Image (tube, helix red, strand yellow):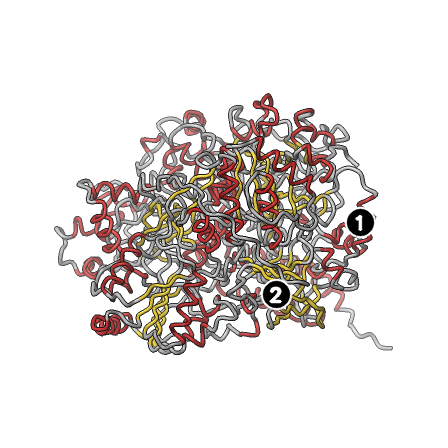
Amino acid sequence: MAQIFSRGTNYLAKASIVGLVLLVGGASTAFGMLWWSPYRSDVGVSVQQVVPFSHEHHVSGLGLDCRYCHTSVEDSSFAGIPPTHTCMGCHSQVWTDAPMLEPVRNSYRTNTPLVWNRVHDLADFAYFNHGIHIQKGIGCVTCHGQVDQMPLMRKTNTLFMSFCVDCHRDPAKYIRPKDKVFDMAWTPDRPQSELGPELVKQYDVQTSQLIDCTVCHR
Amino acid sequence: MSTPPLDIEGVRARLAGKQGPEYWQALEELSDSAEFQKLVHDEFPPLASEWPEGLDRRRFLKLMGASFALAGLTSACGTIKTPREQILPYVNEPENMVPGKALHFASAMPFQGYGRGVLVESHLGRPTKVEGNPGHPASLGATDIFMQASILSLYDPDRAQNALYRGEIGTWAEFSSRMSQQASTYAMSQGEGLRILTGAVTSPTLVAQLEALLQKFPKARWHQYEAVSRDNAWDGARLAFGREVETLYRFDKANVVLSLDSDFLYELPGSLRYSREFINRRRIDSDRLGEGTALMNRLYVVESGRSLAGGMADHRLALRAADVEAFARAVAQRLGIEAGGKALPEGVSAEWIEALVADLKANSGASVVVAGENQPPAVHVIAHLINSALGNTGQTVVYTDPVEAHPVNQAQALHELVDDMNAGRVKTLIILGGNPVYTAPADLPFLEAMKKVELRVHLSLFADETSEWCHWLIPAAHYLEAWGDVRAHDGTVSIVQPLIAPLYEGKTSHEILSILLGETGQTPYDLVRKYWQTKLARTDFDAFWRKSLHDGFMADTAFAPVTVAVSGTVPPPTERPAGEGLEIQFRCDPSLWDGEWANNGWLQELPKPFTKITWGNAALISPATAEGLGFGKASEWRESPLATLEYGGRSLTVPVWVLPGLADNSVLVHLGHGRPLGAWGSRERKEADAIGFNAYALRTAAAPAFGFGATLTKAAGTATLACTQLHHSFANRRGIIRSATLGEFLKEPDFVKHWQHHDDSYSLYPDYEYNGYAWGMAVDQQACIGCNACVIACQAENNIPVVGMDQVIRGREMHWMRIDTYYSGSPENPRAFNQPMLCQHCEKAPCEPVCPVGATVHSHEGLNEMVYNRCVGTRYCSNNCPWKVRRFNFYQYTDRTTESLKPMRNPNVTVRQRGVMEKCTYCVQRINLARIEAKKQGRRIRDGEVVTACQQACPTRAILFGDINDPDSAVRRQKAQPHNYAVLGELNTKPRTTYLARLTNPNPALAAFEPPYESEVQ
């Protein structure tokens, strides 16, 4: 009976072992890159909004405090998105005719809410509480980046679980004095490796308990 | 498993050979068949793991292949991108509204006319959870199942959503102009032919409106009808005192309680309060052991059904409903009251009564006799006489003016209405709530008569049997949607404060009446406020109104006690028909009441006390009656045998269910069933899919509670009832229930230790260290009355889905906590024990090491955590859980598409998907909330700050939760009680949930009648 496979097939068989490793490895790498890419996480992607609201202009330009608009950030789980009324507090006086602000005026006139596209959006099974993070000295910048330099809002961190857990495992790496929480440009005046553990102790952060699943998932 | 393969002789034989307490859950267990053992061995009933129908292996592989391919495709094509969500802020943010923080508002739930105070949790304007109002006299902070489930009724997609005129969509404006026309016509005729039909009414504003209406139209009439009415109580009061009075009980002052077929822990308007007060007199505290037998009250229950009170009884006597009267007469006679009829009912020994009477006499002024709502007026008169003779009046029994505005005999009121309708005297009938076409007695042709009325209007939450035959259907506003007022059992007024604008076009009775009164354009808020402003005429009314709204009740509006003397005598005993045959009893359903709640999935799926039947009803009979009627030896039946129940010339086909402890020769049926679910007229609603049978079809006007001459004959076929009694059972284990008498307990307070044979202090697993909080729970079985409020509260708090009858039959109900009922003693009259069973949060949890993906892990505070997102559904954890408290989502049970159900869900708890395991979390969302608040204020969580949903709902405070590391916490003190034990503690998993043993306080003189209590282990 004649051979079905020619002699050359042996090389092919050997090469396929290497090829398979390369293929699986390549596919995994590609998938991993896709998984962690901005395509999925939206990091660095400016999101289009109904009004091109500029944090840069309002924060670094005009010097508004975060809490002027995000009123419940210190107390509630939700930082709060300002009602149209807050916008109109100023914009009934300034830029009253700006075409860019027409949706805001329209919202106020017709009593219909503005529809904002969510930029920082956690999975629904993760329960994040702004209030406690502010109270324990985690700065806005730590998660949201320097919003005072963002003409349009974008994410600077993935907000994936690994990002959260990085800090929950060792909050000393990121903690800052409570009075610097809203400071966009704060840098530690001495090494964080010294300051961090001190603040963790001072603010009574229960580090062991922070990595319990039910702290965020319930 | 539904019907017991019952062999009564075998059971007796088995029991005869036993010494000491033997606790059993179902008759199957007693007969100990091979089938039962298999059931226990398999964690879920046998069907649980089977494929859905029509899915064979080949098809499964095909589907799986296809789904893997699709999953690969879709993940590559963009579903890995998180969906873009939007935020819609307010235009003008309401004051005090902080997104992310819940608000609570006080209101009151009207139930059968009487109010129960509630605090409703609201998230961004959406009510999500009902709690009791601690300041309200009828709630004391507790809730019942109806208060909890009312939130689901609010969001029920099947509610009536439009006004309907002759089946076509109408408008309120149209209706209101028609009614105005009617009103002007009636102004000429003084209201000749105008009739209003309501349920029992305590609302002062509504009463004022009705009275104004009757004044404006003197010939109009107002009728009242409730399917489960309080006619007997009112008639009894009329006979005894010559007037209607409300009877209030002070169980906190009673040493001895005798219930004459009354379920005072469930059926009275004040039951929530009574439960608390009654149980407070039974709570055991080791610091008070010196008080001896004065520690506990004693409860005698003579009953014809199986009530919550009967389950708590120290001495329980099962009598037919009709025999209770003879029993009551015999007791009265022995107390020197001329009550006629000296003969003792069959099966009652004189000695039993003598001992009871002696006990009552010894506690003159500190005892209570309660007559059941289903018992005839004579029994109520006897109860009044006994209470008066014992000097209880003014002490433990207090009378006030009736809280109901016009407590008429409702059976008679309906009868008059039907007569008038038949005679053509009714031109317009306005039905404000209720469903009389469904609930009217079978021998009263209500529907036929109603069809003769020219204009029929129905105000109703649901389109139903009555709406179908009415010209107008006006959707009613739910109590969480509209303003109103209501009185509690003691007269205290609450303003019913809405939490949300009507979801549909809901209207209230107030609005309809105001049209007839010519006051159009008035909102219910205007009407209620104006009424009180005029009535109270206070200068500080605004402040008073605000305070009343804030508190949830108006201070000092409870009725003052009135002094009444018994002037009447006991009516002579009614002649009983010779050869009376089988007795039939009609009771409101423990979960659905009179059928008003039939479309509520939470209540339908709630295992009823004792029977543990969900989704349906059955004819309940005693084991001996089952045997006598030829059902008993049916050990070949795997399901409930069907039978024909005939009564008064009408018949029904019903499934039969044997309930231990019922009186012989009596069959008990629950009202409120036999209706298909779903919105009226919708495609989903099919008459053939009716759940259970409609017992109203047999109920006559003459005998609404019980009657004689029923027959129950075996019919062809069987039915499968969705009974959960043996689901998640861990029979074959010992020491689950531990109980003793008070006497034994006083002798040996730590008697529960008898069940522990070995030193269980060592373990292969390392000990955890709990430096911060250590959460734990103590459940007082002494206090658990088995009312199910906790089960529904847990369901509401934790977004637990309803699975449906078919899935319950397969053992897949999702309740995170259940009330296990155990019995001890013979099936004729066993003692009952309730045991709330939920995740025990073991320190060395057997579920944790077996999870291959780490989806169930231990927290630093001792919680056994369940991480849904990690769970892949192996169910190993559930296999390894000795308490069987884990629940698996076999399907996508949570309805994720119905819009109206979405705002109902607790936003702080994950809505689970199919394929994940879930279980009690100790309400970790509440722990987290309290922790965050405490941390923000830089303090520890205070004792009592974290209240679990079950704990909060419990009328008797049977559940305590807190930090066991805190030496002063209430839960730690509770766990230090000598009769505290861990269920299956010998497994050495160190459960964080422990139980206090159940104690009873039997009368020593009656020792001969009771099965022995022995705290020895077999």
Residue contact at pointers 2 and 1, CB within 8 angstroms: no
Quarter holding the C terminus of chain B is top right
Residue B577 falls in image quadrant:
bottom right
Q: In the rendered view, would you say B585 is above or below B94?
A: below
Seen from the viewer's position, the closer of residues B713 and B834 is B713
Mark 1 Cα-neighbour bin, 10 Å: few <14, some 14–19, many ≥20: some
Q: Position of residue B700 (x, y in %)?
A: 53, 66
Q: What label does residue B12 carry, if any?
A: 1
Q: Position of residue B502 (x, y in %)?
A: 33, 60
Chain on which label 2 sits: B
Mark 2 Cα-neighbour bin, 10 Å: few <14, some 14–19, many ≥20: few
Residue B824 falls in image quadrant:
top right
Which SS class for mark 1? helix
Q: What label does residue B548 carry, if any?
A: none
Residue B590 falls in image quadrant:
bottom right
Asked whether residue B891 is in view, the answer is no
